Amino acid sequence: MHTLRASKYGLSIKKLPPSITEVIDTLSKAGYEAYIVGGGARDLMLGLQPKDYDAVTNATPAQIKSVFGRRCRIIGRRFELAHVYIGRDLIEVATFRAPPKKEVTSAQGMILRDNNWGTIEQDFIRRDFSINTLYYQPRKGILLDFCDAIDDIKSKTLRLLGDPAKRFEEDPVRMLRALRFAAKLDFRLSKDILAVFTPEMAKLLRDISPHRLYDESQKLFTMGHLQDILPMLIQFDIWKQLFAEIRPEITPFIGLVAKNTDQRIQVGKNINPAFFYAVLLWDNFLERTQFYLNRNMVPAEARAQAGLDVLKRQSTRTIIPRFTETFIREVWEMQVRLLNPKPQQIESLANHARFRAGFDFLLLREKSGDKTTEGMGQWWDQYQILTKDEKELAIIQYNRTRVKKRRRTSEVVIEAPITTEIEPLVKESEVHPRRSRSRTRPTPSPSQAEHKSDQGQVIDAKHPILKRKRVQRDLKQVVFGPTQ
Ligand code: ATP
Ligand code: MG
């Protein structure tokens, strides 16, 4: 083990946010050892802005809890961790871990339970790549290097600790992590990783829960190097495991959105990983819609059913949370509304909550060469910057072309009564297997304002729980779950 002077490698306590130093200092004052480990130390050394800081200590989760009290929550079962809240920041604090005991690994060698506390020497061996094993004590200004990780940082090499095949078998998600770090840091995979990174090995990802894979996929989408990672996912056969039903091909649309996503991240804009799922699954959605249309289903129903089918299938690989599912289906439905809007609804559409995402999607389709948008991406792009009078004119002109087009195609249209109101993009009452339970129950009328709790207890209508509104979750705020 080498103890290095942190300042020699560009690390300084001044560069750290106060929340992480507070966690380290509080634990130290309580008599424990505490370090910054993983991405925080690694990225700072590489001159990058760390996404977050992870702390590690010899205090057990229960001891961490007694140090931070109500500011601390213990999470995870397979991998117990403490979440410490400092102001608005969340710091993940892990306890030094010893090698897992034999009986808690699966037949394939996958670690199933991993709460065996140990020393710092044991803890470092359990980590994945050498560059993730630097322990930084900012107050003391020291960096502990147990495996010449500094050399790998200098030579930009991703090296797994121990036997690579065994380490991938223990936790197949390390394959995804390998590609993520290679793409993000522009590192190369060591020869012995390449030797075992076979399609057969990639298949082990089937044993990983769809929840964990969804978390990992979000990290892939939001790290700012989507353009680099996508070809790697195909090359290493990971794509097949993550997106089984999606053709392993970077279509012009996918490629353009990946580029656009990376650019947005570079300039500090927020991105919603669900948007990229909507893009990846777009062709599947179109094909499935066609399948239902061929069976004479009415278009709106065909789209609704196709959306549900496609997302349900993807969920078997990476779970699609309910709010993500709704978002994706709304973006898809917006494509039809924006392509052929009713003139009197144009302004309402432009103010719709899902307009921005739907419009971005349409414009990116168009820019990637999709002719089926009929230039409407451009039209909406222009429309938004017009004055009120200009907008009225634009709508009149749009209506004229629309009528002409209909005459040309001798389309018989029975217009619905003129209304500016937009039909809901996704109807909650639609057939949905996960919702079916509630549909079979009779809905009590407001006068029957009586509700039952899970235990069958009658809850008074004035009870605060019944007044809670369903809050739309902001995807930008989603905290990724534990990664191990
Ligand atoms: P970033 O946060 O930038 O994605 P990171 O390296 O900090 O990268 P985390 O997922 O935050 O990654 O994990 C923190 C540290 O925990 C890692 O640096 C690594 O040392 C260890 N670690 C995480 N996941 C694994 C794993 N699957 N196997 C072994 N060690 C892991
Ligand atoms: Mg991290």
Image: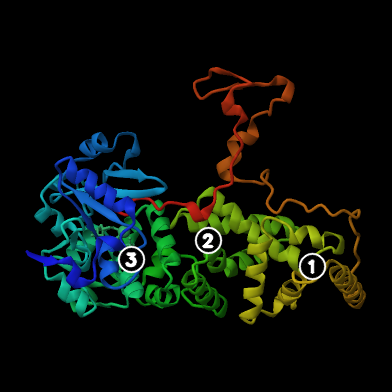
- Gap in Å between the C-alphas at discs 1 and 3? 41 Å
* Residue 272, disc: 2
Decide which of 125, 412 is in the foreground and name it.
125
Is label 2 or label 1 in front? 2
Left or right side of 158 for 207? right
Which is nearer the N-term, disc 2 or disc 1?
2
**Mark 2 Cα shell of 10 Å, populated few (<14), some (14-19), many (≥20):** some
Q: Quadrant of residue 425?
A: bottom right
Identity, as a three-letter code, of the amino acid under mark 2: Asn
Q: What element carries label 3?
A: helix
Residue that extends furthest to the front in the rendered view of this protein: 14
Image position, residue 401 (x, y; %): 88, 76
Is label 3 or label 2 in front? 2
Displayed-image quarter of ligand 1: bottom left
Whether residue 292 can be seen here:
no
- Gap in Å between the C-alphas at discs 3 and 2? 20 Å
Decide which of 80, 284 is in the foreground and name it.
80
Identity, as a three-letter code, of the amino acid under mark 3: Leu
Q: Is mark 2 on a helix, strand or loop?
A: loop
Identity, as a three-letter code, of the amino acid under mark 1: Asn
Decide which of 162, 222 is in the foreground and name it.
222
Residue with the mark numbered 1? 340
Residue with the mark numbered 3? 176
**Mark 3 Cα shell of 10 Å, populated few (<14), some (14-19), many (≥20):** many
Quick check: 288 above or below 59? below
Quick check: 480 above or below 288? above
Give the total number of marks visible in the rendering: 3
Q: Residue at x 43, y 57 (%)?
A: 214
